[in-house]
Amino acid sequence: MTVPEMLRRIEGPNLVLRLIRPDDAAYVRALRTDPRYNAHLSPVQGTVEDQRRWIEGYKEREAGLGELYYVIERRDGTRCGLVRLYDIKGGSFTWGSWILDEHKPPKAALESATLLYMVAFDGLGLSTATFDVRRENATTLAFHRRFGATETGETAQDVYFTYPRERFETDRTTHWTVCASV
């Protein structure tokens, strides 16, 4: 199995999601080890070469549509973030590893999330997103609440959410209109 062409590169008004490549390793490692961006992510160890090898191994999961890892780019090709879909099974998926850097355009969070949901709901035909956000990540918690995700539980460390396809379908036009107006 391979990733269908329509899921390899997804374009929005201001951003593009494109599947990660081994030559993105230095960018990924730099973002994942930068304290401005990694406070709420799992720690990353190793070198750029280790990251390259991880990406090469991930490509097997990508080919089986078990995981999709995207570089977020501005329309001019400048990389400005990362986002990943994983645990794709039984009509649901989890998403995370979401980082937007200082090169992001206005409304990049809204547009990258909308593009990601288009991949999952339209491209893969999935029905439900599940994800967790660290409690201390107030900005991301507020984003998901405004986006319409439903809180399903919490621990001392995380807040758990679901977001159904039906809600996305209801809100998609509004999200796109906001993104396109930037």
Image (cartoon, rainbow, N blue to C red):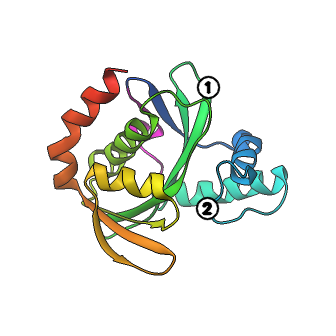
Q: Which residue corresponds to the image point at 41% horizontal and 71% vertical from the top-left? A: 159
Vertical comparison of 5 with 139: above or below:
above
Q: Quadrant of residue 145?
A: bottom left
Q: Mark 2: which amino acid?
A: Leu
| First reached walking from the N terminus: tag 1 or tag 2 | 2
Q: Which residue corresponds to the image point at 47% horizontal and 31% vertical from the top-left? A: 16
Judge from the rendering whether residue 172 lies leftward or rightward of residue 64; answer left or right. left
Q: Say whether residue 63 is magenta.
A: no
Query: Residue 163, how many percent across, how many down?
Result: 27, 60
Vertical comparison of 68 with 180: above or below:
below
Of 114 and 143, nearer the camera is: 143
Task: Please give the label number shown on residue 41.
Answer: 2
Query: Residue 160, how many percent across, how many down?
Result: 38, 71
Q: Mark 1: which amino acid?
A: Thr
Q: Which residue corresponds to the image point at 67% horizontal and 59% vertical from the top-left? A: 57
- Mark nearest the camera among 1 and 2 is 2
Judge from the rendering whether residue 120 lies leftward or rightward of residue 164; answer left or right. right
Q: Quadrant of residue 118?
A: top left
Label 1 crowding class (10 Å Cα cut-off): few <14, some 14-19, many 20+?
Answer: few
Query: What span is colored magenta in the figure?
Result: 1-12
Q: Which residue is mark 1?
A: 78
Judge from the rendering whether residue 77 lies leftward or rightward of residue 93; answer left or right. right
